[in-house]
Image (tube, rainbow, N blue to C red):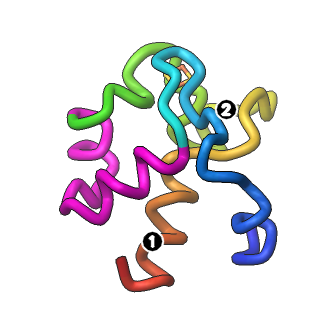
Amino acid sequence: MTIEEFEKFTPDHIVCECFDVTLESLLDAIKAGYNTLDTLMDETDAGTACELCQSRETDEDEDRELHLEEILEYAKVKGF
Ligand code: FES
C-alpha cells in the first residue's frame, strides 16, 4: 500500500471490526509507544479476535481494507 493510498483512510475508519477500533486510536497508541504488533494488540485489543485485521497474511480473502501491520509500517515511514 502506498502512502497516498493509506492517507485516503479517514481517522474514524474502523480497522478492527471485532472491537470497533479506529485508525485514529491505533495511530494514537503507536505514538504513545505501542509500536510493535504485539504491544499494539495488547493495548487496543485490535487483532485479538478473528485476526483478519492483523495483516494481509491473516486476511487471505481481503475482508479488511486496512491492517495493523500496514499502519505500523506507515507510522515507521512517517517517523512516529
Ligand atoms: S477485525 Fe480485528 S480481530 Fe477481528
Q: Which residue is mark 1?
A: 75
Could you say whether the residue bearing mark 2 is in a helix, strand or loop? loop
Residue 12, magenta (yes or no): no
Residue 80 vertical position relative to residue 19 in the rendered view, above or below = below
The residue shown at (28%, 56%) is: 36
Q: Is residue 3 left or right of residue 58?
A: right
Specify the quadrant that holds the N terminus: bottom right
Q: Position of residue 73 (x, y in %)?
A: 50, 68
Q: Which residue is mark 2?
A: 59
Above or below, comparing residue 3 to residue 38 in the picture = below
Residue shown at the point (54%, 71%) measured from the top left? 74
Instruction: List x then y, in percent, for residue 68.
Output: 50, 47
Residue shown at 33%/48% (left/top)? 37
Residue type beneath disc 2:
Asp
The residue lying at 43 percent from left, 14 percent from top is 49
SS at badge 1: helix
From the viewer's perspective, is 22 left or right of 10? left
The percent position of residue 60, horizontal first and vertical second, equals: 73, 32
Disc 1 under 8 Å from ligand 1? The reply is no
Amino acid carrying label 1: it is: Ala
